[in-house]
Image: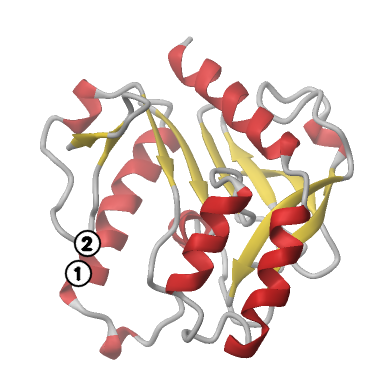
């Protein structure tokens, strides 16, 4: 694994599987997205995509068993939902850009989501989602476009449909990479980028800070 300027270790599952000792070396995991969609037809999935799904399922299973701590975002919530026996479909896409997220009553006492403002603004861009939380999960956040925006399993596994991890500038850089991949009309890039850069995403940043504190506790 490589470390970034913040000292966090980064691992690209597209390039290499999880190290055998990964759960001994790290206290927690944040899954920041993927170039894939979980609902891609099985016959069209590459070996790299299968490797990504396998590695993420391994992390999710360990966190669900309280053997590690993990936060899965966007593509990752689909992996967790399927692992738990839930259904992921393309019936719940969401536009690229700022979205309003509402906390549920169960979020109030949560170690990560409790105390966040509701509603708050977060960044979204996805082609798939879930109509209901999977078995064993507690719904923490929702909105009108995609009902399952965040949930918790036990006290160590979290999953969000929205992206809490990028700054607005980092998100627009990611948009430039995916501008021709069907998440939004390519000709709308400048207009959507301006909306993203003007958005306040302070609460997702607080969420990440609280998750980090939980993982290191």
Category of crowding for the residue at label 1, using alpha-carbon neighbours closer than 10 angstroms: few (below 14), some (14–19), many (at least 20): some
Q: Is residue 89 visible?
A: yes
- x and y percent of residue 32 in the render? 45, 50
Q: Is residue 190 above or below residue 153?
A: below
Residue lying at 22% horizontally and 61% vertically, measured from the top left: 14
**Which residue in the protein does label 2 denote?**
14
Residue lying at 54% horizontally and 18% vertically, measured from the top left: 214
Name the element at disc 2: loop
**Which residue in the protein does label 1 denote?**
48
Q: Is residue 152 above or below residue 41?
A: above
Front residue of 132/126: it is 126
- x and y percent of residue 37 in the render? 44, 74
Category of crowding for the residue at label 2, using alpha-carbon neighbours closer than 10 angstroms: few (below 14), some (14–19), many (at least 20): some
Residue lying at 51% horizontally and 80% vertically, measured from the top left: 179
Residue at the far top in the pictured view: 217
The answer to whether mark 1 and mark 2 are in CB contact below 8 A is yes
Can you tell which mark lies on residue 24? none
């Amino acid at each position: 694994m490589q470390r970034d300027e913040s000292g966090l270790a980064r691992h690209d599952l597209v390039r290499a599987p999880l190290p055998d000792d990964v759960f001994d070396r790290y206290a927690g995991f944040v899954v920041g997205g993927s170039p894939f969609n979980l609902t891609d037809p099985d016959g069209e999935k590459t070996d790299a995509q299968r490797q990504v799904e396998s590695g993420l399922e391994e992390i999710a299973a360990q966190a669900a068993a309280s053997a590690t701590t993990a936060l899965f975002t966007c593509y990752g919530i689909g992996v967790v939902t399927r692992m738990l026996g839930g259904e992921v479909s393309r019936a719940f896409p969401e536009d690229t850009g700022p979205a309003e997220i509402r906390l549920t009553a169960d979020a109030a006492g949560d170690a990560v989501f409790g105390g966040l403002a509701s509603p708050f603004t977060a960044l979204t861009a996805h082609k798939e989602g879930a109509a209901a939380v999977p078995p064993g999960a507690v719904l923490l956040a929702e909105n009108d476009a995609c009902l399952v925006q965040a949930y918790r399993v036990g006290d160590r596994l979290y999953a969000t449909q929205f992206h809490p991890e990028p700054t607005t500038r980092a998100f627009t850089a990611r948009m430039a990479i995916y501008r021709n991949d069907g998440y939004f009309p390519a000709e709308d890039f400048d207009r959507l980028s301006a909306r993203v850069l003007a958005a306040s995403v302070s609460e997702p940043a607080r969420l990440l800070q609280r998750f980090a504190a939980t993982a290191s506790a």
